[in-house]
Amino acid sequence: MEINPLIQKLQNKRIILGSASPRRKQLLEELGLTFEILAKNVDESYPDHLSPTEVTEHITLNKAKAFADILKEENTIVITGDTIVAQDHYILGKPKNKKKAIEMLQNLSGKQHQVISAVAIARKNFTKVSHDTTQVFFKKLTPSEIEFYIDTFQPYDKAGAYGIQEWIGKIGIQKIEGSFYTVMGLPIHLLYKELKNL
């Protein structure tokens, strides 16, 4: 029986997912990795002059830097990530309340936006950050669809106030150009490539 080539390569490595995101946890499990979860509270602010792509890389790198003490250990790999939703270069963060969530989904309704996800792979004296962008096209959402989704799924931990893998994605997204998993929160194809290249 063939062994997953990535698992073979990463034998004897301690892999840490520096994120509390259940979506990132799920995707790493589906990649076949054995890992620990160790989330840290990191300042997610950023300089105003940064572009949306630079913002997600900046935050992802800061999340990796928070593990500087652990990264002194040999054979330890830390994976961090960040996802932002951008529309006309304006960043939509995580909604603080229902009113904000409604506003965000109303802005996305019937329009195109971008989802940018970055991933960092950090080891002792080495950190590589890369990103991927997917274009997302929403149909025109009705007020009742928006209200139902927010009340049922409580998307307050999600950039742009939605999760593509949830009900709103199934009924509201007409098409995407790029990776589904980038929208879900982790450019898994980039992570696989960079882990193979270690």
Image: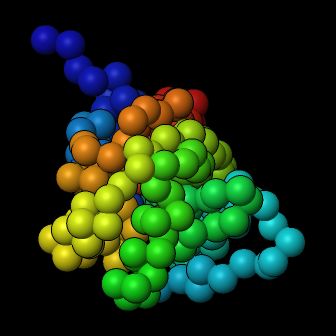
Q: Nearer the viewer, residue 141 or 30?
A: 141
Image spot of residue 139 (x, y percent):
41, 44
Residue at 57%, 69% in the rendered image? 92
Image quadrant holding the C terminus, namely top right
* Above or below, comparing residue 36 to residue 195 in the picture: below
Taking the view exactly as shown, the residue that stands out farthest to the top is 1
Residue at 50%, 42% in the rendered image? 136
Q: Nearer the viewer, residue 139 or 121?
A: 139
Q: Is residue 191 left or right of residue 113?
A: left
Way the structure is coloured? rainbow
State which quadrant residue 197 falls in: top right
Q: Which of 197 and 47 is in front in this view?
A: 47
Q: Is residue 79 left or right of residue 37?
A: right
* Above or below, comparing residue 29 to residue 97 in the picture: above
Q: Is residue 170 left or right of residue 74?
A: left
Q: From this viewpoint, is residue 88 visible?
A: yes
Residue at 86%, 72% in the rendered image? 49
Image spot of residue 41 (x, y percent):
46, 85
Image quadrant holding the N terminus, namely top left
Q: Which of 109 and 91 is in front in this view?
A: 109
Image spot of residue 186 (x, y percent):
44, 49
Image spot of residue 130 (x, y percent):
64, 46
Residue at 19%, 76% in the rendered image? 151
